[in-house]
Image (cartoon, rainbow, N blue to C red):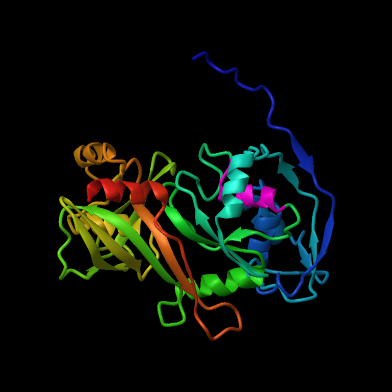
Amino acid sequence: MTDQPIPLHPPSSTAQQVQWLTISEDQAGQRVDNFLMARLKGVPKARVYNILRKGEVRVNKGRIKPDYRLQPGDLVRIPPVRVAQRTPPGKPSDQLLRLLENSILFENEGLLVINKPPGLAVHGGSGVSLGLIEALRLMRPEASYLELVHRLDRDTSGCIMVAKKRSTLRHLQAALRNKGVSGVRKVYQALVLGQWPARRHRVDVPLLKLELNSGKERIVKVHPEGKPSLTEFRVLRAYGDCTLVEARPITGRTHQIRVHAQYAGHSLAGDEKYGDDDANDRLRKVGVKRLFLHATELGFYLPGESELTVVSASLSDDLAAALVKLS
């Protein structure tokens, strides 16, 4: 591979004009610093706080602090800020667009629930030019608002929520933080190595997230200084030297199910980060060619509704076929 020439000039950028924005009901409630960072994509965080500190950002013609929460009807002045031009996301193939259109499990005026295909990152970045959210925005160019409510690992398939309104995003993210009966119920199916004890129903140990390679890689481990983390497990079926389990993460930590299963001595099949390489090689021969983890069900309360909405996605074809071979 030949060396690439080092650019002699910084990337091109564009200078915006002064913007005057009136805050809608749906935009209200968020902090002004978060509002600005969402509007000024490509502007360093330090620069956003700098223009706030200098009073260049005004709300109703007055200076405000970064933690000011916007109100309906507020008039926000955003000064001209030079924004680095970003590489546009790759164009999704017609095949991917058809797949995503056929993967919609639920839709109303505020929410989409998608059966995410395996291998598709939820968003671009870190070498990924096009993720689920970028593809959905290109698939729905008329949509004024599409944001991920939560995330799934790239190799994890199954149910994922995408908000079509900011009020829906706020409602569901608050529900995700609520561990009570009004919270979001998440149910996964996972194939773990070995025979999971039928009597073991919970793994309740703290998890600590670490960043390696200057933040390019994340790894999670059980550690007393980590955040409290609880996953409930239930055996569904034994397959020789593997067990199909149901996993319900009560808390929502990064890689929680994977690390809790590893801690219990039963790593997930196909897990290249926390799993067993020799076992993964054996399972690859029967079709387990990626992380065997599928978000099979979501239960949630929509804004203003008292009845639980439940959305489910059958085990993806590749994982279901692997189970047949293991039988």
Q: What secondary structure is the stretch in magenta mostly built from?
A: helix
Viewer-nearest residue: 81 or 228: 228
Q: Quadrant of residue 90?
A: top right
Q: Residue furthest bottom?
A: 306
Q: Position of residue 153 (x, y in %)?
A: 43, 51
Q: Position of residue 260 (x, y in %)?
A: 26, 59
Q: Is residue 18 above or below residue 298?
A: above
Q: Is residue 160 above or below residue 110?
A: above
Q: Quadrant of residue 282?
A: top left
Q: Quadrant of residue 172?
A: bottom right
Q: Is residue 267 above or below residue 14?
A: below
Please report the residue visible at 30 percent of the width from the left and 67 percent of the height from the top: 231
Number of callouts in the render? 0
Q: Position of residue 207 (x, y in %)?
A: 30, 60
Position of 273 with respect to 40 (left or right) is: left
Instruction: Report if residue 254 is visible in the image.
Output: no
The stretch of residues the image draws in magenta is 130-140
Q: Position of residue 217 (x, y in %)?
A: 40, 43
Viewer-nearest residue: 2 or 308: 308
Q: Is residue 68 magenta?
A: no
Please report the residue visible at 18 percent of the width from the left and 68 percent of the height from the top: 200
Viewer-nearest residue: 219 or 99: 99
Please report the residue visible at 80 percent of the width from the left and 75 percent of the height from the top: 73
Instruction: Report if residue 243 is visible in the image.
Output: yes
